Image (tube, helix red, strand yellow):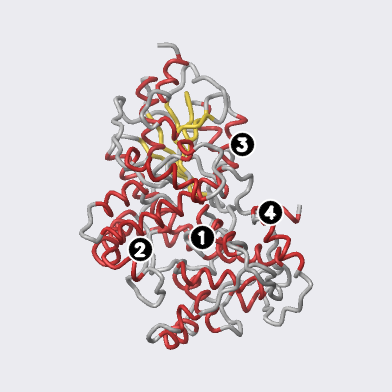
């Protein structure tokens, strides 16, 4: 079979709508492997990126080499993020070995610099398969590599149950999105794991891979040039076992009352807390929905959870795919930007310093309770996020500064930051449905009070405790955050 015919193997794959070529190259003659470069989909099972690489490797009669590397200089690199990523990477490697695939890893540090490692691995590759991620560094790094190598680079969507390409490009609103998304879910809910026909790659490599051990991660991370003031959080333990335990908790404890309890931030069983594991791809949405659909819970609870996981999360992924930069201020609806601009000169008596905001030491007890959940847990309940984000508009000197501050706090502290869903939620808080009357600072953007928390039984006491909980003393940057796209 010609090389172009072998590449077409992915076009005939039942998961083909997940695959998007990033360049027009053909597989290289003499390639020793298909390189599967993972940045965020850190799981070995139910991973369409790995499955696509295996299918292509089988067609080319080549092994698959899975590579995952972590640099020190990604935005907001910290102990918290590094630990979560690297613990997932350890389980990824073990899962690949069980699938008969080689997985190699590299952690950048002073004594182990490997400049251009993906390009060097690509020299011996017949093709490169990457994730189709619409946000953060994964997007531009994949596109940059695709423009510089001489082999095909194929991006595969692993974050969504229904591939965004199935929806088409012409959807403008969530209602129209759901009209196409909901009927497609059943057809995309199941998956078949591709089996490698070729033995695991054991040949030469252009570097010496790291051998990562869970009991040595603390020492390794302590020696890196990253932000050590943002510590690991025990509330969201890292790794595949922890993710599976959180999924078991969802089915047993959260789902049976989900539709009734999900908005109550004071309850421990009101939220799944799966978003960090979904963000880093430790769990996939197909796996989560399989557990939900098989759970002994009422239909209304399953439908509500599906609406959150699929109806909202995948809508935000769809939006991000069609935005040049989902984290940019100008993604906000034009009417909202205009009304916020019209009120940019209003007096802002609630303005706070960045230090007070970052450390949860403002004059607003409820906001402090929200922010301290970010600091302590690396995650925030969705009902708290809405209040937290709305209040930032009044606590900062301009709407542009508010957007930059919200993204900065979210991306630096949260394990599910830097994500289409969190950027989409922030954008909703800056817009949403316009109100009929103008308010100071906000204009026609709706404000939000804390009554949904305070009016619950024990709400006042819960907020007082949450606002005073001990949190790490994170470092405060010298300059306030800015939207890099506006700054340039």
**Spatial separation of the CA atoms under disc 1 and disc 3:** 29 Å
**Disc sitting over residue 223 in the figure:** 1
Question: Nearer the N terminus, badge 1 or badge 4?
Answer: 1
Q: Between residue 403 and residue 92, name the one nearer to us.
A: 403
Select label 4 or label 3 by which is in front.
4
Toward which corner of the image does residue 219 lie, by quadrant?
bottom left
**Spatial separation of the CA atoms under disc 2 and disc 3:** 36 Å
User: Mark 2: which secondary structure?
Assistant: loop
How many other residues sit within 10 Å of disc 2, few (<14), some (14-19) or many (≥20)?
Answer: many
**Spatial separation of the CA atoms under disc 4 and disc 3:** 24 Å
Question: Nearer the N terminus, badge 2 or badge 3?
Answer: 3
**Pointers 1 and 2 in contact (CB under 8 A)?**
no
**Disc sitting over residue 144 in the figure:** 3
**Disc sitting over residue 272 in the figure:** 2
**Spatial separation of the CA atoms under disc 4 and disc 2:** 31 Å
Q: Position of residue 470 (x, y in %)?
A: 47, 81
Q: Is residue 451 above or below residue 279?
A: below
Q: Between residue 261 and residue 226, name the one nearer to us.
A: 261
**Spatial separation of the CA atoms under disc 1 and disc 2:** 33 Å
Q: Which residue bears the numbered disc 4? A: 330
Q: Residue at x 47, y 61 (%)?
A: 415
Select label 2 or label 3 by which is in front.
2
User: Mark 4: which secondary structure?
Assistant: helix
* Quadrant, the N terminus: top left
Select label 4 or label 2 by which is in front.
4
Q: Between residue 202 and residue 173, name the one nearer to us.
A: 173
Question: Nearer the N terminus, badge 4 or badge 2?
Answer: 2
**Pointers 2 and 3 in contact (CB under 8 A)?**
no
Select label 1 or label 2 by which is in front.
2
Q: Is residue 484 above or below residue 258?
A: above
């Amino acid at each position: 079979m010609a090389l172009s015919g072998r590449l077409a193997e992915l076009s005939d794959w039942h998961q083909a709508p997940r695959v998007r070529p990033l360049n027009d190259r053909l597989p290289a003659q003499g390639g020793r492997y298909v390189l599967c470069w993972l940045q965020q989909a850190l799981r070995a099972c139910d991973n369409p990126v790995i499955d696509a690489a295996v299918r292509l490797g089988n067609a080319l009669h080549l092994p698959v080499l899975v590579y995952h590397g972590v640099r020190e200089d990604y935005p907001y690199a910290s102990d918290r993020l590094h630990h979560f990523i690297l613990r997932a990477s350890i389980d990824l490697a073990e899962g690949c070995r069980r699938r008969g695939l080689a997985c190699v890893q590299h952690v950048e540090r002073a004594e182990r610099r490997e400049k251009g490692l993906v390009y060097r691995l690509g020299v011996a590759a017949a093709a490169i398969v990457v994730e189709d991620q619409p946000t953060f560094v994964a997007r531009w790094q994949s596109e940059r590599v695709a423009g510089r190598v001489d082999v095909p680079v194929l991006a595969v969507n692993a974050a969504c149950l229904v591939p965004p390409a199935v929806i088409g490009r012409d959807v403008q609103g969530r209602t129209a999105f759901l009209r196409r998304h909901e009927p497609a879910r059943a057809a995309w809910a199941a998956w078949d794991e591709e089996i490698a026909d070729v033995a695991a790659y054991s040949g030469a490599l252009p570097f010496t891979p790291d051998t990562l051990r869970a009991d040595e991660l603390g020492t390794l991370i302590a020696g890196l040039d990253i932000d050590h003031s943002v510590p690991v959080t025990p509330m969201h333990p890292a790794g595949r076992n922890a993710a599976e335990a959180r999924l078991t908790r969802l089915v047993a404890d959260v789902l049976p009352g989900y539709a009734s309890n999900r908005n109550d931030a004071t309850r421990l069983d009101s939220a799944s807390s799966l978003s960090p594991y979904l963000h880093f791809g430790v769990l996939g949405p197909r796996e989560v929905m399989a557990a939900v659909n098989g759970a002994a819970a009422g239909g209304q609870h399953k439908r509500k959870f599906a609406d959150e996981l699929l109806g909202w999360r995948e809508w935000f992924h769809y939006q991000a795919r069609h935005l040049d930069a989902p984290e940019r201020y100008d993604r906000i609806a034009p009417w909202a930007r205009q009304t916020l601009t019209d009120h940019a000169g209003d007096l802002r008596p609630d303005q706070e310093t960045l230090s007070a905001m970052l450390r949860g030491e403002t004059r607003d007890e409820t906001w402090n309770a929200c922010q301290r959940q970010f600091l302590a847990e690396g995650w925030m309940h969705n009902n708290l996020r809405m209040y937290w984000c709305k209040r930032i508009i009044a606590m900062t000197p301009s709407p542009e500064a508010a957007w930059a501050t919200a993204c900065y706090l979210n991306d630096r502290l949260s394990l599910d930051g830097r994500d289409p869903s969190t950027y989409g939620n922030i954008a909703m808080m800056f817009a949403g449905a316009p109100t009929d009357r103008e308010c100071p600072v906000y204009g026609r953007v709706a404000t939000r009070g804390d009554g949904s928390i305070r009016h619950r039984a024990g709400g006042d006491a819960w907020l007082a405790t949450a606002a005073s909980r001990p949190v790490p003393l994170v470092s405060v940057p010298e300059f306030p955050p800015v939207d890099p796209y506006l700054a340039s």
